[in-house]
Image: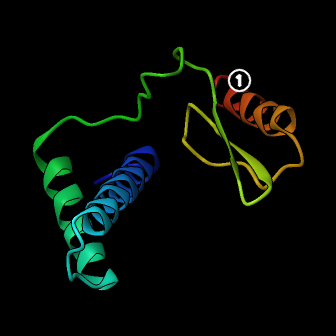
Amino acid sequence: MIDERGQRITELLTDNVHAEMAAFRALHELEMDDRTIETLAEAVAANVMYAFAVDWSPSWLPPGVPHSWLWDGHWFARCPACLRDSAPAASQEAAVTWAETHAAEHHA
């Protein structure tokens, strides 16, 4: 049985595989529809999760520091404990504060 964090890791891995496959398709002008790429990404992620120990561990961040990003004019941050993403925020600081506060709740 997969726990909530494991499920979120699977989702993040699937999203990353999907993004890489979509970029590869565009770069090489492959004729693959979105559904095919989605299905392949899900299959690759499922097989990786089945055979390997996988965790969210971005090399560009120190351990425990929330990942934050700007998307479509809004800031988001990811709780490093449960990997839940913040709601859209007006500033990076607001998004990171949410993630830090949320992470602290896991240790309370």
Instruction: Give 98 or 16, whichever is nearer the viewer.
Output: 16
Instruction: Spot the residue most to the left.
Output: 51
Residue 77 in the image: state x and y as whole percent.
68, 40
Sort mark 1 into few (<14), some (14-19) or many (20+) by Cα contacts within 10 Å: few
Q: Residue at x 82, y 31 (%)?
A: 97
Which corner quadrant holds the C terminus?
Answer: top right
Residue 46 in the image: state x and y as whole percent.
20, 59
Q: Residue at x 37, y 46 (%)?
A: 6
Instruction: Give 52 or 19, whichever is nearer the viewer.
Output: 19
Image quadrant where residue 94 sits? top right
Q: How many marks can you see? A: 1
Amino acid at the residue labelled 1: Ala
Q: Residue at x 67, y 30 (%)?
A: 103
Q: Is residue 39 above or below residue 64?
A: below
Which residue in the protein does label 1 denote? 108
Q: Is residue 70 above or below residue 105?
A: below
Instruction: Give 70 or 98, whichever is nearer the viewer.
Output: 70
